[in-house]
Structures are given as structure tokens and as C-alpha cells.
Image (spheres, helix red, strand yellow):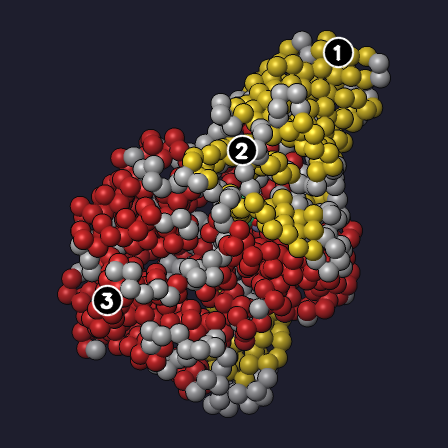
């Protein structure tokens, strides 16, 4: 068992006066700080966090006495430094003064450098990414979320550059060195991981919210036009959140900054939110509907953090979900308000809700609240459990309490803990206060236990009998488990007879539903509002076929049924041909989200048999049959004024139909692509992903070179991503090898390397190559991404596509002898998934074969 790495509770920072001076040519920085400390127990030693910093000097000033730290001792393993003084530092307030130096690294963590071009000239900016535990790489600090303090930041910016930090600049003056000194207003009391320092050449646009908060978007020169959408969404979302939380945003300015090299998608630094370019820039002529929607969601997510995370912060990383689960829930609330026509809540069920069910169905998952100690463990829990399961159980709770009580609970929680820290229990307390319901009792097992329940339902005479047990996505995982958890499940039941739903709370192993069904259909977990799967008896499932086909059930209910059919098949609870048959009954389905889950269900089964050419060919025909109708209906042309989700649907079904080998679709893609090359037509952004992928899947060197040169000429990162994804989809092994090399070349920013490797992995012709490549180049991957950053697992996760046990063995052996910091859980998840795939194929191969050969 690891011991705690927490800092002393007797030494607390109250205020930092911090100055940073980056050297954009030498890739270094200098810093000095005065930290006002409150010491509650006399001590000779002060320990704080510091990583890769060289400390010049440290002194402590108390009253009129100054003492020098005679000894400065680094503890690189714990990322700490200890200053030892000759005499005890007394109780009370004093000032710790530290002078230090650091390196502007190229690892996208701490205070780092990023490259951009202005009029063809290469430039360097300095920028920061401090979550989770990298403030200690920028300045010696008490780098824990509950050690909140006020920060007075000054930045010395080289001539010609702009400096941005969390608050607004109060004074900008020229220093004798020619540098500009930016003094920023004091921050609110806040955690270290939320600070931001950015120095570079920027252009910006700005607006004001209804209440007068200044909102600005900063981009590197030449990209201002792509900033307009973000500015609009951000200012409207800020209005929305101020109203919803009933607490005004406390700063006079909110900045959004597009950073060319960025490890995550975006980061919620208080008042200075940083973004990867693809998560903020929208080019009206070149951005797809899907990407525009992504940008809006990311903006709303980071804005939600200004309250959830920044104003009220988790006590420790164990409660990370209070940040990430929350923001992942509330982003949908805001976007539903701003873009009601996007049907975003329905999309929640096919995205977050679904990915949480997937990950949390494994034995190698973790409870939402999980003990974590060191930076590697902390970085591992930024996953679908904290984000997506977190948001899904909040949606369940919101449904149980009703929207007003839910909102009031949040308001009460924020008010009570503002400028301070909180834990999961504090949140349940707030909901109990406003609702009078036993929230803690109902929610306890959802956050403290791994996994979620499978609810089975059978009909006995006039009664429905429900029972629950933990769901495992594979019988293998289930066999090894002795989990007897009973969840309190609030859930909705929709019946034909009533045409409305009824809410129940199932808090026992078995439960009699007091309902007469009388041969009519019944849909459990209406609206998929609970985080469960449902297994119907055969007769009850058969009854649901009609209401699905006639559209008597809503899209969310239709998707729940087909999603569970595929996943129950993987789990060994239903035969695979049952799910394949069911997919066929969805042929007239009109809705995007339902199709997206049918597509992913089919994909899972196809994956199992993709190495068998005969079966694969027959499966292709089945896939074409499934997608032909809807793809024909959608066509290649955008209809005037069509629904946003119809644009998404078109891309989805055309790409699936083409992927299953439909010749007409492939030919059409090739024609459109050759028009692009001849500069004959502007290709609609929503079709570009489809066209590039199908051209690549059916192309050779000529198409490869064409896509590659388009990539090289392109400025817009979103378009680069579409093009480079296609480079991973060719059939030729020689070309795929070239792609893998390319991913690590200077042409590709390190932030995007994993994406390209991912596409080679998911390509049936590429998966072996990709794995061999990752193995061979592991030292390089470690060097670039291996210091516990969260990109490392991305090179391992796609190996979950394998179906054969030999591969699992190989992966296991490899990681026994090779370090993979911050990727332990990911490796175990991949191994479990491969074993699950292999077992599924063994179990169902015969019936899949019989089904597709007969079709
Ligand atoms: N706080 C995170 C950024 C982050 C992620 C920091 C991992 C350190 C480690 C931010 O709020 C976030 O969640 N960003 C997401 C985008 C979001 C819309 C899901 C991301 O970066 O993917
Ligand atoms: Zn977040």
C-alpha cells in the first residue's frame, strides 16, 4: 500500500507573488516568488513541490527577521524540495522568497513551448498546462487542490509578444531590458492547477456578456475569422451558467486561447481557458457539423468548470469526478439551451452514456471515487469512468429529483463551498437538503463501487419480476468476480397501456413490479435515464419489435434496446445472431443516434470475423443490406434547411455503406475526390471524412501521395486530422508503414501522433503492423509521451481490437518488461477486452456463420 504523498497540514500558502520571465529563444525561463505562509506548528523544514526546476535561493522573512535556507534538498521521486532553516520558523504568517529557473519544455506540460508560423516564419510561444500536478514544473508550489491561495502574477514578455494570465492586466510597462512587464490583477482564492501563463503573438476578438463580462478569443495571427463561433458560444454560455448556478462569474474577463500544441482537448484555467485548435476554431467553409458541435460542447464544458472545479474544487483527486463528471453533464444542459435543434441529450446517450457502459462493464474498471496517490495514478483516472459514468449517474439523479430540485441542490452546494473544497458527500448533502430524499443512500454504491447492474425481467402470470446483478461485458470477467453489490436503482417504466411512464426505486436484489402487462409491450429504463442494462425475457423482447418499427418508442428507447442486444451477446447472455437479426428490423429507422449504435454494434461483430476472408465477405453483404436503404434516403446532397442530426446521419451511413464495400458509394467518393484534386468543386465539409476514408480504403500509392500533399499544404488542423486519418486506412502494408513513420515525423505535431497510430490499429490490414511498430518504437514513445502524461495510454488502448489470445500474451509479456507510466489500467483493460473478444468468437462463431451465410 502506498503511503500518502500529501504535504504538511501545518504549512499553508495564503498568497503568491509570482514573476515569470520566459526566454523564447533559449527555451528557458526565470522566476521568483514570495509566498505568504501561515505556519501553525513551528518547524525548521518547509517542503513544497518542485519538478525540473533549479532553485537559486530560498529565504524566510518573519517580521523583521530574515533566515536563509542553509540546505535545499530535492526529492525528485516525490517531486518535492525541502528547505531547511537553522532555527524553527515560528507560528504565524511569514514570507518565503524563492528564486528559480526552468526549461520551456516540448512535452506540453508545465510551462512549455509551442510552435506556430507568422507569414511563413517560425515562431515560439510559451504556454502552460498545469493540471493535474504540473504547477510544480512552473514554480515551486504547494501543488495540491486544497492548498488554495491568491495569486499576483507578473509576466515579463519579450518585445512584440502579448502576455495572458487568469485575470486582467492592471499595469503594462516597459522594463529596461526591453521586455514588457505585465502585472495582472490578483486572482480569487484558487488551486495551483488552474493557473495559466501564455506569452506569444496573438490576435483577438472580444465581446461582452449581458452582465458586462468581457469575453475574448485569442488565436495566432491569421485565424481570427475562425474564432467567431467560439466567441458567440462562450458569451452565451456564460450568461446561461450565471443564471443556472445563480452565482455571477467572479472575474471581469474570460479569455479563450487557441494553442497550436496542446496535450488534452482543452483546459479550464480560471479566466484563461486554453484549447487545442480543433476544439475551438470553426471555419464556416471547412468545419464539419460534427466538429462544430464538438467545439460548442468543449466550450460549454470548460465554462462549467469555472464553477464546478474552479469556484468549488475537489478536496483531493479521488473526487475528480466532481469536476469532470459534472462538467460532462452540464455541458449538455448548456448546449441544449443554446442549440435546441441539435437534440443533444439524445446524443448524450449514444456517446457518454454508452462509453461509460462499455468501460465500466470490465472487471478492470474502478469506482468513481478511487484512492489515488501519485501523479501517475492521478492521470489514469481522467477516463470514461470519471467523465462519462460520472455524467450518466448525474443524469440519473437529475431524473430522480426533477430538474428544479437538481438545480437547487447544485446552487446550494456551490454557495456553501465557494472558494473552498468539497467531496462527494458534500454534494449528496446539498441534494438531501433541498429534496428531502435519501440521496446519499441511493447514490452511495454508484460512486463507491465499480460496475453497474444488469436488470433481468421476466413475466410471471400478471406480474413482472425484476432482479439485479453486476453486469460484465464478458462471461470470463464475470467468472472471476464475487461481486454481490446491490444498487439502489431509480428507474422509469413505460407501458403501452398507460402511454406514460412511472418511476420506481429498486433497492433490492429482486423486485416485483406491480403492473399488469396483459400481452402489451413494456419498456424498462425509459429514456435510458438509469445507468443499467436490461435483459428482457424472450417474449417481452419480441413484444418490443413493433413499437420500435412503428416509432411508438422514442429514439433513446429504440437505441437502448439494440445497444443492449449487442452487448448482451458479447456478455454471453444472448446469441450473436439474435442481435444481427434485430439490427435488420431497424432498417426503417430514421434517427441518427440509433444508427450510430447499430453501426457500432455491427462493427463489434465484424471485428470478430475480419481475419476470415469468406466470412468477412458475407458480412460485408449483410452490412450493405443494412445501410443501403437509409444511405439512399439520405443521399449525397445536403437538403436545404435539414436537421443538424440529419447531416451527421448522412456522414455516418455513407461511410458505413462504403466501408461494407458498396461499389456505387466507393465510386462516388472517388469521383468527388478527383474533383477536389482538379480544384473543380468545393467538397462539403460533412462529406470530407467519408470521401477521404473511402478513397484510402480502396486506393493505392497515387491516392496516398495526393492525400499526403494535401496534408502538407493544409493550415486548418481539423482538415489535417481528416487527411491524416485516411493515411491510416490504406490496404497496402508498405503504405501503412510509411504512415506510421510519418506520424512520428516533424510533419506531425506530437499532440496528433497517437491519432494516426490509432487509425492504423483499427484498420484490419494495419493492426499487426501498428502493434509491432509501437513495440519497436516504445523507447521513442516513452521519451516523448512517457512522463505520466495522459497521451501514453492512447498508444495502447487501440490494441483492444485484437481477437486472438496470442496477441494478448504478447502484449502482456511486452509490458512486463517495459515501463508504461500512467498506463497500468489501460493495459489491463486492453488484455481483458482481447480475451473477451476471443471468447465471444469461440462461443458464437457457428451461429454468426450460419446467420450471415443464410442472408
Ligand atoms: N480538465 C480537463 C483537461 C485535462 C484533461 C487536464 C486531462 C489534465 C488531464 C478539461 O476540462 C477536459 O476535460 N477536457 C476534455 C474535453 C472535454 C470536453 C471532455 C479533453 O481535454 O478531452
Ligand atoms: Zn473537464
* Residue drawn at the location 60% of the way across and 36% of the way down: 162
Neighbourhood count class around disc 3 (C-alpha, 10 Å): few under 14, some 14–19, many 20 upward: some
Q: Earlier in the sequence, mark 3 or mark 1?
A: 1
Residue pictured at 76% horizontal, 31% vertical? 14
- Residue at the spot 68% in from the left edge and 70% down from the top edge: 402
Disc 1: which residue: 67
127 and 522: which one is in front? Answer: 127
State how far apart marks 3 and 1 are (Cα): 77 Å
Residue beneath disc 3: 671
Q: Residues within 10 Å of mark 1 (few under 14, many from 20)?
A: some
Q: Is residue 557 above or below residue 676?
A: below
Q: Is residue 788 left or right of residue 779?
A: right
Q: With respect to residue 579, does 17 lie above or below?
A: above
Q: Which residue corresponds to mark 2?
A: 126
Circle 1 — which element? strand
Q: Is residue 515 above or below residue 710?
A: below
Between 647 and 424, the one lying in front of the other is 647
Residue mark closest to the camera, 1 vs 2 = 2
Q: Earlier in the sequence, mark 3 or mark 2?
A: 2
Amino acid at each position: 500500500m502506498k503511503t500518502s504523498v500529501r504535504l504538511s497540514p501545518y504549512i499553508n500558502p495564503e498568497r503568491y507573488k509570482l514573476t515569470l520571465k520566459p526566454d523564447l529563444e533559449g527555451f528557458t525561463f526565470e522566476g521568483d516568488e514570495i509566498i505568504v505562509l501561515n505556519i501553525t506548528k513551528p518547524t525548521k523544514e518547509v517542503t513544497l513541490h518542485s519538478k525540473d526546476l533549479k532553485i537559486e535561493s530560498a529565504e524566510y522573512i518573519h517580521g523583521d527577521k530574515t533566515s536563509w535556507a542553509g540546505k535545499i534538498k530535492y526529492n525528485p521521486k516525490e517531486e518535492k524540495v525541502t528547505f531547511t532553516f537553522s532555527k524553527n520558523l515560528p507560528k504565524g504568517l511569514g514570507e518565503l522568497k524563492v528564486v528559480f529557473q526552468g526549461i520551456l519544455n516540448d512535452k506540453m506540460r508545465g510551462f512549455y513551448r509551442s510552435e506556430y508560423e507568422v507569414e511563413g516564419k517560425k515562431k515560439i510561444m510559451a504556454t502552460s498546462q498545469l493540471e493535474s500536478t504540473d504547477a510544480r514544473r512552473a514554480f515551486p508550489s504547494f501543488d495540491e487542490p486544497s492548498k488554495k491561495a491568491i495569486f499576483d502574477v507578473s509576466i515579463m514578455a519579450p518585445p512584440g509578444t502579448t502576455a495572458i494570465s487568469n485575470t486582467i492586466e492592471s499595469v503594462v510597462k516597459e522594463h529596461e531590458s526591453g521586455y514588457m512587464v505585465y502585472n495582472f490583477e490578483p486572482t480569487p482564492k484558487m488551486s495551483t492547477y488552474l493557473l495559466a501563463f501564455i506569452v506569444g503573438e496573438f490576435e483577438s476578438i472580444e465581446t461582452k456578456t449581458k452582465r458586462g463580462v468581457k469575453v475574448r478569443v485569442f488565436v495566432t495571427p491569421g485565424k481570427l475569422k475562425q474564432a467567431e463561433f467560439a466567441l458567440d458560444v462562450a458569451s452565451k454560455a456564460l450568461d446561461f451558467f450565471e443564471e443556472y448556478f445563480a452565482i455571477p462569474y467572479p472575474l471581469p474577463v474570460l479569455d479563450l486561447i487557441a494553442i497550436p500544441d496542446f496535450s488534452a482537448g482543452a483546459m479550464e484555467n480560471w479566466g484563461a481557458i486554453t484549447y487545442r485548435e480543433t476544439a475551438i476554431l470553426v471555419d464556416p467553409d471547412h468545419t464539419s457539423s460534427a466538429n462544430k458541435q464538438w467545439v460548442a460542447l468543449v466550450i460549454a464544458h470548460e465554462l462549467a468548470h469555472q464553477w464546478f472545479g474552479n469556484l468549488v474544487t475537489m478536496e483531493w483527486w479521488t473526487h475528480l469526478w466532481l469536476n469532470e463528471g459534472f462538467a460532462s453533464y452540464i455541458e449538455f444542459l448548456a448546449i441544449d439551451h443554446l442549440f435546441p435543434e441539435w437534440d443533444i441529450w439524445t446524443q448524450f446517450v449514444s456517446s457518454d452514456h454508452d462509453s461509460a457502459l462499455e468501460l465500466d462493464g470490465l472487471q478492470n474498471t474502478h469506482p468513481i471515487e478511487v484512492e489515488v496517490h501519485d501523479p501517475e495514478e492521478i492521470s489514469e483516472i481522467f477516463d470514461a469512468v470519471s467523465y462519462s459514468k460520472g455524467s450518466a449517474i448525474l443524469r440519473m439523479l437529475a431524473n430522480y429529483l426533477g430538474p428544479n430540485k437538481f438545480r437547487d441542490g447544485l446552487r446550494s452546494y456551490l454557495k456553501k463551498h465557494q472558494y473552498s473544497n468539497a467531496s462527494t458527500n458534500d454534494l449528496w448533502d446539498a441534494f438531501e437538503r433541498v429534496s428531502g430524499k435519501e440521496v446519499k443512500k441511493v447514490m452511495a454504491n454508484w460512486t463507491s463501487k465499480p460496475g453497474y447492474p444488469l436488470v433481468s425481467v421476466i413475466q410471471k402470470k400478471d406480474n413482472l419480476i425484476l432482479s439485479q446483478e453486476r453486469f460484465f461485458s464478458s462471461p470470463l470477467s464475470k467468472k472471476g468476480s464475487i461481486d454481490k453489490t446491490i444498487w439502489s436503482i431509480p428507474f422509469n417504466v413505460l407501458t403501452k397501456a398507460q402511454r406514460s411512464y412511472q418511476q420506481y426505486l429498486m433497492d433490492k436484489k429482486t423486485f416485483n413490479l406491480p403492473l399488469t402487462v396483459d400481452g402489451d409491450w413494456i419498456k424498462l429504463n425509459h429514456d435510458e435515464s438509469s445507468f443499467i442494462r436490461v435483459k428482457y425475457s424472450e417474449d417481452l423482447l419480441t413484444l418490443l419489435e413493433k413499437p420500435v418499427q412503428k416509432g411508438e418508442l422514442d429514439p433513446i428507447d429504440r437505441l437502448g434496446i439494440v445497444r443492449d442486444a449487442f452487448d448482451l451477446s458479447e456478455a454471453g447472455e444472448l446469441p450473436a445472431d439474435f442481435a444481427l437479426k434485430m439490427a435488420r428490423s431497424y432498417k426503417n429507422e430514421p434517427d441518427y443516434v440509433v444508427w450510430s449504435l447499430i453501426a457500432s454494434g455491427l462493427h463489434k461483430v465484424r471485428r470478430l470475423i475480419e481475419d476470415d476472408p469468406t466470412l468477412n465477405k458475407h458480412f460485408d453483404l449483410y452490412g450493405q443490406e443494412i445501410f443501403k436503404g437509409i444511405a439512399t434516403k439520405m443521399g449525397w446532397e445536403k437538403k436545404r434547411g435539414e436537421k443538424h442530426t440529419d447531416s451527421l446521419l448522412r456522414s455516418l451511413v455513407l461511410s458505413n455503406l462504403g466501408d461494407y464495400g458498396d461499389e456505387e458509394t466507393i465510386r462516388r467518393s472517388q469521383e468527388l475526390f478527383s474533383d477536389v484534386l482538379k480544384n473543380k468543386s468545393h467538397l462539403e465539409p460533412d462529406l470530407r471524412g467519408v470521401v477521404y476514408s473511402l478513397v484510402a480504403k480502396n486506393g493505392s500509392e497515387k491516392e496516398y501521395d495526393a492525400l499526403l500533399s494535401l496534408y502538407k499544404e493544409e493550415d486548418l488542423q481539423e482538415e489535417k486530422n481528416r487527411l491524416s486519418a485516411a493515411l491510416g486506412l490504406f490496404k497496402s502494408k508498405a503504405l501503412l508503414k510509411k504512415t506510421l513513420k510519418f506520424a512520428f515525423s516533424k510533419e506531425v505535431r506530437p499532440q496528433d501522433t497517437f491519432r494516426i497510430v490509432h487509425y492504423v490499429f483499427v484498420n484490419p490490414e494495419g493492426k499487426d503492423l501498428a502493434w509491432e511498430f509501437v513495440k519497436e518504437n516504445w523507447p521513442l514513445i516513452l521519451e516523448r509521451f512517457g512522463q505520466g502524461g495522459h497521451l501514453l495510454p492512447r498508444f495502447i488502448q487501440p490494441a483492444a481490437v485484437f481477437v486472438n489470445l496470442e496477441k494478448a500474451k504478447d502484449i502482456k509479456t511486452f509490458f512486463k518488461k517495459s515501463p508504461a507510466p500512467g498506463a497500468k489500467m489501460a493495459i489491463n483493460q486492453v488484455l481483458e477486452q482481447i480475451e473477451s473478444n476471443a471468447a465471444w468468437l469461440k462461443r458464437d462463431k457457428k451461429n454468426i456463420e450460419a446467420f450471415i451465410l443464410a442472408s
